[in-house]
Image (cartoon, grey):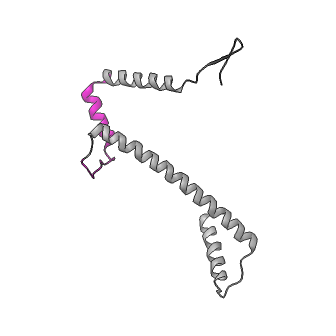
């Protein structure tokens, strides 16, 4: 059921429930509309959580690239790729490649799972 169909059915049901001069929508249609509305709300909450997480990443990135903002201010994100390009050019590509290699190596070390030994056999939990 599309969001538009969901809204239409729920509005009709609410109008009927409030004593409007319309025919009662079928209970099956109302139930499906409620289920669809729940899915839409849950999806919106997941989307909001993702947006908040990405906003945090962009804010931290802007602060690293541009310096800490003044109190009660924050940096814009629109120019982050250009700021990063300027810093890469200023630092030199070899320095950047070395930093990226170090970052990848550190990430792989954090991602490894510990190996446990049990009765002479080695297994990964």
In the rendered image, the vertical position of residue 65 relative to residue 123, given as above or below: below
Q: Residue at x 66, y 77 (%)?
A: 13
Magenta stretch: residue 81 in it? Answer: yes
Q: Identify which residue is drawn at 74% across, 75% down.
A: 26
User: Compared with residue 99, is residue 23 higher up or lower down, i.e. above or below?
Assistant: below
Residue at position x 31%, y 22% from top?
95
In the picture, measured across the screen, residue 122 lies left or right of residue 113, that is: right
Q: Position of residue 51 (x, y in %)?
A: 46, 50
Magenta residues span 70-93
- Asked which quadrant contains residue 43, the reply is bottom right
Give the answer, above or below, for where 1 lies relative to 21.
above
- Quarter of the rendering occupied by the C terminus: top right
Viewer-closest of 77 and 4: 77
Q: Quadrant of residue 7?
A: bottom right
User: Furthest residue to the top?
Assistant: 120
The percent position of residue 90, horizontal first and vertical second, equals: 24, 29
Q: Nearer the viewer, residue 13 or 121?
A: 121
Q: Residue 22, image x and y in percent?
A: 68, 85
């Amino acid at each position: 059921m599309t969001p538009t169909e969901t809204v239409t059915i729920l509005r009709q049901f609410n109008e009927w429930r409030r004593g409007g001069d319309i025919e009662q929508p079928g209970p099956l249609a109302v139930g499906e509309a409620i289920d669809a509305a729940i899915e839409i709300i849950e999806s919106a909450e997941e989307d909001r959580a993702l947006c908040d997480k990405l906003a945090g990443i962009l804010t931290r990135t802007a602060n690293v690239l541009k310096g800490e903002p003044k109190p009660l201010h924050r940096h814009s994100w629109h120019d982050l790729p250009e700021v990063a390009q300027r810093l890469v050019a200023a630092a030199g590509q070899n320095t950047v490649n070395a930093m990226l290699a170090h970052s990848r190596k550190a990430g792989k070390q954090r991602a490894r799972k510990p190996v446990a030994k049990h009765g002479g056999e080695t297994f990964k939990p």
